[in-house]
Amino acid sequence: MAAIETKRLSKFYGAHRGIEQITLSVERGEVFGFLGPNGAGKTTLIRTLLDLLHPTSGSATVLGLDSHRDRIEIRKRIGNLAGDFSWQPKRTGSELLSLIAGLRGVTEMDYAQALAERFNADLTRPLGQLSRGNRQKIGLLQALFHRPDLLILDEPTGGLDPLMQEEFMAVVSEERERGATVFLSSHELDEVQRMCDRAGIIRDGRLVAVEDIGELMSKSDRKVSFTLAETDIDPGEFRDLDGVGNFSADGPEISFTHRGPIDPVVKLLSRHTVVELDLTHPSLEELFLAYYTGGRSTGDRPDSGDGDEAAG
Ligand SMILES: Nc1ncnc2c1ncn2[C@@H]1O[C@H](COP(=O)(O)OP(=O)(O)OP(=O)(O)O)[C@@H](O)[C@H]1O
Ligand SMILES: [Mg+2]
């Protein structure tokens, strides 16, 4: 049974498109990242899953339960962070946690305390007095502290400083170890690349791609560039290697894209004196930005396209 399953889920705000015909399955134990430009429909999807919005058509299940009929049971079993997390401004983080603990029947607060320390969260000040990032930490705590089976988080790292973002990513990887499912939206492609098993892209309310990140990275061309000490080299020996594309040589400075096993490149290099060597994979950003700008549609594979066509 999937952790989240939607079938042709649509939500219109009157005539305004929120999300349209979203069919998606998130497996148990998976960390799924949800990307898309502003206004694409990420928050609408999340709010619809939580039954905060009623779908115009289609259906959704969360942990096998119907998103509308079983909303109360679902709320008990998941952790949720809204994109614009806020609560009564005069109340403190501690008060919020106690309230939620009561509602969920949680008595064990050690993990809440541990998280508060890790995130350096101030549970004693009224939420209205906290900076945006510090308020966000309270939002994360209330989503995480009861160790739910499923976390649904709308831009969890929004407003967090880089150290706290790292801490959050560490928490997500612990949650994954524990077997929890994490469904999160983000604008940070780099963060999604590091945390998530799969990523979905939503644009203009429609799901335009779902990709396995490991697979995507391994299929993409790497960029190889190096400088050799010798000046009398024959660049042809590199150009002729399997999987080489976009070859350029400027004296001892050589660069190309490469697909396939890297070992032949390394073996050939080892016969030379290497002064500089740079080997990179394109970031998820490079691979995915085309989806944002409308350059790709469902079915197209985001491979770099600048490899040697004949070699494939
Ligand atoms: N209450 C509302 N009434 C009318 N239209 C709405 C409402 N809420 C959202 N929308 C519209 O639904 C679409 C999707 O908005 P949504 O907030 O889901 O986007 P998002 O992907 O979360 O964007 P962001 O990255 O800015 O958070 C937008 O076109 C938005 O204008
Ligand atoms: Mg949003």
Image (tube, helix red, strand yellow):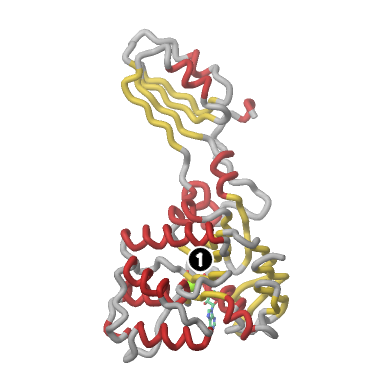
Q: Is residue 122 visible?
A: yes
Q: Residue at x 40, y 62 (%)?
A: 168
Q: Nearer the viewer, residue 106 or 66?
A: 106
Q: Give, as a three-letter code, the residue at label 1.
A: Ser
Q: Residue farthest to the top?
A: 232
Q: Which image quarter is the N terminus in?
A: bottom right
Residue 12 percent coordinates (x, y): 63, 80
Q: Is residue 16 visible?
A: no
Residue 44 percent coordinates (x, y): 56, 76
Q: Is residue 264 above or below residue 187?
A: above
Quarter of the image for residue 65 reads bottom right
Label 1 residue near ligand 2, CB within 8 Å: yes
Q: Which image quarter is the C terminus in?
A: top right
Crowding around mark 1 (Cα neighbors within 10 Å: few <14, some 14 to 19, many 20+) is many
Tell me how many marks there are. Answer: 1
Mark 1 — residue? 185
